[in-house]
Image: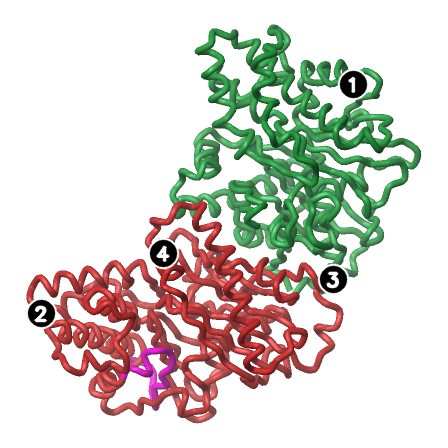
Chain colours: A red, B green
Amino acid sequence: MLPKDIHEKESLLIAGIMSGTSLDGIDVAFVEISGEPGKPDYRLRSFHSVPYNPALREQLLKAYDGTLPSRDVFHLDKLLGDRYASAVKNGAIEAGISMAAIDVVGLHGQTIYHDPPNGVTVQIGSAAVVAEELHTVVIDDFRTADIVAGGEGAPLVPFCDVMLLAHPSRNRIALNIGGIANLTWLPAGTSIENLVGFDTGPGNALIDAAMRELRGLDFDEEGKLASEGSVDQRLLLSVLSDAWFQTPPPKSTGRELFGEERGREIARRARADEIEDATVIRTLTQVTARSIIEALERFIVPCREIDEIVVSGGGAKNSTLMQALVELAPETSIITSDSLGLPGDAKEAIGFALLAWATLHGVHNNVPSVTGASGKRLLGSIRCPKVV
Amino acid sequence: MLPKDIHEKESLLIAGIMSGTSLDGIDVAFVEISGEPGKPDYRLRSFHSVPYNPALREQLLKAYDGTLPSRDVFHLDKLLGDRYASAVKNGAIEAGISMAAIDVVGLHGQTIYHDPPNGVTVQIGSAAVVAEELHTVVIDDFRTADIVAGGEGAPLVPFCDVMLLAHPSRNRIALNIGGIANLTWLPAGTSIENLVGFDTGPGNALIDAAMRELRGLDFDEEGKLASEGSVDQRLLLSVLSDAWFQTPPPKSTGRELFGEERGREIARRARADEIEDATVIRTLTQVTARSIIEALERFIVPCREIDEIVVSGGGAKNSTLMQALVELAPETSIITSDSLGLPGDAKEAIGFALLAWATLHGVHNNVPSVTGASGKRLLGSIRCPKVV
């Protein structure tokens, strides 16, 4: 059912589409991938980011809260599919890429529900709509196969971190700070087999929610407001006392635990306690930093060496957060993936292009040692309605 | 990404799974398919039917009504996937088929929402769960590609009717009476290109809903209660006055218009008007028969010849309904598909095995002249997480 020439081409142009838990918008990476099925070479041709408009974001938040009626969720799935298709089209025009040159789309979708113990995870943004609009093969639904195999369905990016960031002689931590933060331990010369990776807890999600509650802004740009406050120890410890942080990996989390509702509630209570806005934001920034470094100390350092931490995701742009990480781990080199030539913003979208490449070539692309799944699985579901 | 040997096998054993709008349960047809991609030979190995338990049925009705919260819908999707997998496993055991012999599953799922004008159709029953449990290739989501191409996403069975029921010298109507009734016009020696087919309106859905409201029973067995009543002309015309019946094809409908709510409401009002139960059921049986024959007269007969009507689906077992059809079309031969060696109960499930075969071989399997889609599409989404 795949286009006949797809396995004959020397390289494929794959559009990876990512929308993270921070609900900020749509990332599209156009990636040229070639080489061996299990050891591809990649080249980022172009990266584009489109913010959600406020009305759409509002709907997605309601979907995430579980307050949007099911039929509205179904229509939202369709609408978001349209948005994804437009994001690819507009990105291609900007980058001077012809639509006909795009072979495959690797579509993460927008997570609106994630419940690993019950084997349920839901991403919306209709792949059928994207395939119809773009005339390409579309691979989506990457998390379900892992979660129904007893895994967390997350994080999936460690599979890509090996390809993107593993180093022959340096032991690295790939740390992505999106809405949620996750890390992958990449020992020198590592392969996919024995990876360790897990969510560490909130990335920007609590900070962003508190910014919306307190200031009506979507995020704390470059960590400026946080830099004007101090850490409130009581508030810090009350958030960090959540039992989830102690749970050993494999583990994953989402907006259910560290999301909009929680962030806004923390902000409201803090204000009622007359804690200054800047201090609330500074403290939540510290929550992110502390939970990351403590996760490293608890689950990685006891038995493994770390030479450097490579940070990607929106959090890498938050100077106060980066500074807090440096202060908490003074002996470890902390660098951004940008400094290695890998745009941190684009990393997850590139990751879904690589995951799609693997699925297309029959290369198992979950990492059971990371997700806890009972075995290797080929993630995703493939459709190509108009291409034969 | 497909198992390497799947295109090398002379024949494939495909399990077609169907759950219709009547919400009565799960049908599984094990079908041996071989031959040319576009002109397969099929042999029904075995057919199984598992009724939904009342609690599950209740949940599905709520999902259909739109009253089930979205998160419950997501869990129901998973649960139903488990049920589908069990139905296949148990059916295989009963039929003496080894699980390893099953190559592919063609999964319709349970429709819980169908809104063609807005390009949205939703079937639940997780394909990922079925693939995980059965270790097979699973193809699902057959309606979306058509509906996002501007089609009705229904009916899909005309594609299969050509293979199953077309006759070299007789002009046939293939009439399926499930929850909703649909027909396909199969002129002698027809091919797939110029098919006419559409939903005619209620099949058993209104009768079943009224039986539940009035008698606490799920259906009128063999049309017995109806046979004890007479047709109430005023009630008959009030239902048939719905503008939908006049709409020319392509058209499709579902439980939104002719479903549980509507059937129960009709029954409640009739009872308030002191119409006897048997007369209510007899009248709703006449609604089904009249709407079918009037659709034939309106949209087929003016320009096309009919030699015989071949009836399948649960409605073929309703003697009062069959008798009403004969009385309304006295000059046309009306026979059951069973009399032609094709079990009417199994037809739709066999259909989804044939649709899956086509998708697997890259044969377009929507029929634009039936659905109104803007062009040919390869329906469905393919996954095989554990097979390489």
Location of the N terminus of chain A by quadrant is: bottom right
- Give the farthest residue toward the left: A274
Which residue does the image show at 40% across and 44% down from the upper left?
B72
Q: Which mark is residue A64?
A: 4
Magenta extent? A302-318
Secondary structure at numbered mark 2? loop
CB-based contact (under 8 Å), mark 4 and mark 3 = no
Is B88 one of the magenta-colored residues?
A: no
Could you tell me the amino acid type at mark 3?
Asp
Q: A139 and A81: which one is in front?
A: A81
Q: A56 and A116: which one is in front?
A: A56
Left or right, B106 with respect to B164, comes to left
Rounded to the nearest whole Å, what is the CA distance between mark 2 and mark 3?
A: 66 Å
Could you tell me the amino acid type at mark 1?
Ala
Q: Which residue is mark 3?
A: B5
Q: Which mark is residue B329?
A: 1
Residue B88 x %, y %: 61, 42
Q: Which residue is mark 2?
A: A275
Looking at the rendered structure, whether the residues under marks 4 and 1 are on a common chain is answered as no
Q: B95 and B174: which one is in front?
A: B174
Foreground mark, 3 or 1, reads 1
Foreground mark, 4 or 3, reads 4
Residue B100 x %, y %: 66, 51
Secondary structure at numbered mark 4? helix
Rounded to the nearest whole Å, what is the CA distance between mark 2 and mark 1?
A: 81 Å
> Mark 2 or 4 closer to N-term?
4
